[in-house]
Amino acid sequence: MRKLIVLLITLLPIAAFSQKVVNGFGVEYLMGKTYTSTEHMRFAFPDTSKIEVNMTGETKVYGGSLYFPFDMGVKRHRFTLAIGFEYKYSSVGLGTAAPVIDNNRIQREGLCLNSTTYTPLVQVLYRPHFYIGRLHTSFSIGANFKYTVFKSLEISDKDNQALVSYKDGENLIDFGGNPAGERMRDLGFHIDPRIGLDFYFNNSFMLSIFALVPDVTNIANTKSIKVQFGAGVTYLIKTNKITEAKILQQYKK
C-alpha cells in the first residue's frame, strides 16, 4: 500500500499542473486464463477431516474496472495517468481422488476454488499518437500498479454452491505450500504490465484493446503462465484547454 501512495504523490502534481490535461472517465472489461502447475492442497468441512484436492492447472479470470484518466505530454508523445478501481473474479478447478461428501451427506461435484478481489489501481501509460488513414490512433505501453484491499476465497461446487470459505483464523482451507493458492490468499501490492492499441472517435470517445500480464513479479514463484485480454471505452471530457485531438490534427494526412 505504501508503494501505491508514493506513486500517487509523485504523479498527481504532474497531472494537476499540466497545460494539456484531458479529463474523462472510462470502463474496461477483461478476461483471461492462468496456467499453473497442478499443486495439491486440502480443505475440510467444519468438524471433519481434511480432503486432499489438486488444482487442475487452469484458472479462468473475468473482471472490469472504472478509471479516471489524466493526459499530459508534448505534441504526439503523450502520457496517461489514470486512477481507478478494479473488480476481478477467478476460478480454478479442483480434482479429487475420491467423492466429496459434505456434512449433510450430499455428494459435491465439480469443485472450484473461487477468488473475488476489489483493487484500487494507478495506471501509467505512454501513448505515441499517429493516424491510420483518417483514423486517429495511439499505441499504449505501461503498467497498472495495484493494491488489493478486499478479497474472498471459497470452494464451491458445479452449481456454484459455496462449501467452505477461507477466513483469517480458520483452518478450513489449507494450501499446504501450494504457491499459486497461497498467492491468491496473500495478494496485496502487484504490478500488471500491459500493451494496447487505442482508437479515437468524434474527439470524445476512445476505444481501447489491450493485453496484460497480471502480478508479473510473482510468475516464477507461483510457477504460472498468465495472460489477460480486454477492451475499454473512455469518454474524454472537453475542456477549454488544448485537447489531444486538436494537438494531433497537424499530423493528419
Image: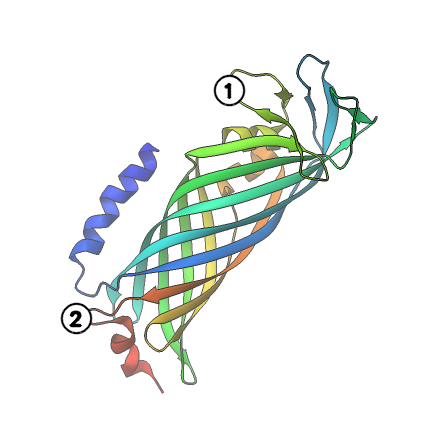
Q: CA distance from mark 2 to mark 1?
A: 51 Å
Does residue 19 appear in this view?
Answer: yes
Relative to 102, does residue 26 appear above or below in the rendering? below
Q: Residue at x 35, y 33 (%)?
A: 1
In-image side of 146 versus 8 (left or right) = right
In-image side of 47 versus 227 (left or right) = right
Q: Residue at x 44, y 51 (%)?
A: 65
Relative to 160, does residue 202 appear above or below in the rendering? below
Q: Residue at x 53, y 54 (%)?
A: 30
In-image side of 152 versus 140 (left or right) = right
Residue 107 horizontal/vertical position (percent): 80, 28
Q: Earlier in the sequence, mark 2 or mark 1?
A: 1
Relative to 246, does residue 179 appear above or below in the rendering? above
Between 64 and 185, the one nearer to me in the picture:
64
Helix, strand or loop at disc 2?
loop
Q: Which residue is mark 1?
A: 168
Residue 117 horizontal/vertical position (percent): 49, 38
Relative to 135, does residue 41 appear above or below in the rendering? above
Between 102 and 41, the one nearer to me in the picture:
102
Q: Which amino acid type is marked by label 1?
A: Asp
Find out whether the residues at labels 2 and 1 contact each other: C-beta distance under 8 Å.
Answer: no
Q: Residue furthest front?
A: 104
Q: Which residue is mark 2?
A: 240
Q: Which amino acid type is marked by label 2?
A: Asn
Q: Quadrant of residue 170?
A: top right
